[in-house]
Amino acid sequence: MCEFVGRGAGVVRMIGRALRGAVVLLAGFVLVSGCGSDRPAELSVDEVKPCELIPQSDHQRLRIAVETQKLDSVEGIDTEGSTCAYRTNTGNSVYVSTITNHGIDRWVDPPFESSHSEEVSRIQGYRTVKVWHDSERPDPDSKCKVYVDVAGGQLLRVQVGMTSDEEDPPTCDTARRFAETAMGTLIADRG
């Protein structure tokens, strides 16, 4: 009987060790999962040229009228990166920017009083936020920005200026179309 109890205690100790090991592994998995990103892949934009993200073959579909203009900066407070400017057939301005010093969290809850944001459906599996200014709901003709979470501390941003042309779709729709095209190119170039 004592021999059986001794073996039983050993079995209980082995089961206890196995359970502790499983708990440690599970806790490690939860910590790594919680701290990690839900991006399909990291798409660093450090060396990306924004004017190459909208292929010439898409210019007609996107209603681009004027050739691109490369800018070595990005509009915004404390924002680094580069921009490519486009003019549409209706005269609206569209700016495609690679931002290298801010992540998506900055825009989930914008730091500026007059800015508002909303998470929208992902682009190519990447988290996407729409940002507008001044009103509680985005006005279809007001300036709109779409930010896509491409890498840790980096974004793709498409900004569309205010429009007054009745033929123009809502500015946020235009921003999203340009962002989808740019993301398609960015992903294809990494593949």
Image (cartoon, grey):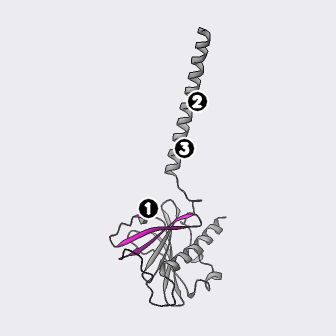
Q: Residue 99, image x and y in percent? A: 48, 68
Query: Image quadrant for the C terminus?
Result: bottom right
Name which residue type carries label 2. Answer: Ala
Instruction: Provide the residue designation for mark 2.
Output: 18
Q: Quadrant of residue 50?
A: bottom right
Q: Quadrant of residue 138?
A: bottom left
Is residue 129 one of those drawn in magenta?
yes
User: Mark 1 and mark 3: span between their CA atoms?
Assistant: 23 Å
Name which residue type carries label 3. Answer: Phe
| Mark number, residue 105 | 1
Q: Residue 34, image x and y in percent? A: 50, 50
Q: Residue 166, image x and y in percent? A: 48, 90
Q: Earlier in the sequence, mark 1 or mark 3?
A: 3
Q: Residue 2, image x and y in percent? A: 59, 8
User: Mark 2 and mark 1: span between their CA atoms?
Assistant: 39 Å
Q: Earlier in the sequence, mark 3 or mark 2?
A: 2
| Mark number, residue 29 | 3
Q: As drawn, which residue projects farthest toward the left? A: 113
168, above or below 28, in the image:
below
> For the residue labelled by badge 2, is the local secondary structure a helix, a strand or a loop?
helix
User: Mark 3 and mark 2: span between their CA atoms?
Assistant: 16 Å
Camera-nearest label, 2 or 1: 2
